[in-house]
Image (tube, grey):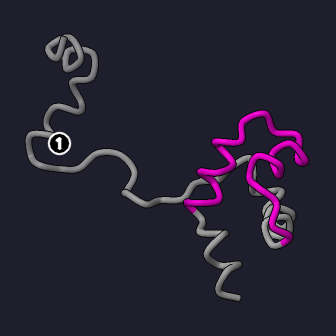
Amino acid sequence: MIIVWFAAFPFLLVPTWEGQILGKPKGTIQKSKFDKHAEKIKELLDYGLSVRKISSVLEYTNHIALNTYINKRNLKKKLQTT
């Protein structure tokens, strides 16, 4: 299985042996589909709505992805300190 993977991607073999770390750095925040509603999400969190309720208000079917978005950007903690 591993041999087949390296046969398909031989250009990754040498950097890995040399100890080079491949991929994006840990902790990098990328664009999200929730970015366009960021202010509305902060406002609804400030009112005390649950993540599940916010996802239904914004018509998103996946509340878990919204919860991950909120946690990675520390939106709940920012609102509690202000």
Residue 49 location, quadrant: bottom right
Q: Is residue 7 above or below residue 62?
A: above
In the figure, is residue 75 to the left or right of 41?
A: left
Residue 67 coordinates in the image, percent (x, y): 64, 51
Instruction: Name the magenta segment's main secondary structure.
Output: helix
Between residues 63 and 10, which one lies in front from this camera angle?
63
Q: Is residue 75 above or below residue 64?
A: below
Residue 12 coordinates in the image, percent (x, y): 23, 33
In the figure, is residue 68 to the left or right of 82?
A: left
Disc 1 marks which amino acid? Pro
Residue 17 coordinates in the image, percent (x, y): 9, 40
Q: Is residue 30 magenta?
A: no
**Which residue ends up furthest to the left in the rendered image?**
17
Region of the chain picked out in magenta, as a range: 47-72
Q: Measuring 16% from the left and 17% from the top, which residue is drawn there?
A: 2
**Residue bearing the label numbered 1:** 15
Q: Is residue 50 magenta?
A: yes
Q: Is the C terminus in the top left, top right, bottom left or bottom right quadrant?
A: bottom right
Q: Is the N terminus in the top left, top right, bottom left or bottom right quadrant?
A: top left
Q: Measuring 72% from the left and 36% from the top, which residue is drawn there?
A: 62
Q: Measuring 74% from the left and 46% from the top, which residue is drawn there?
A: 33
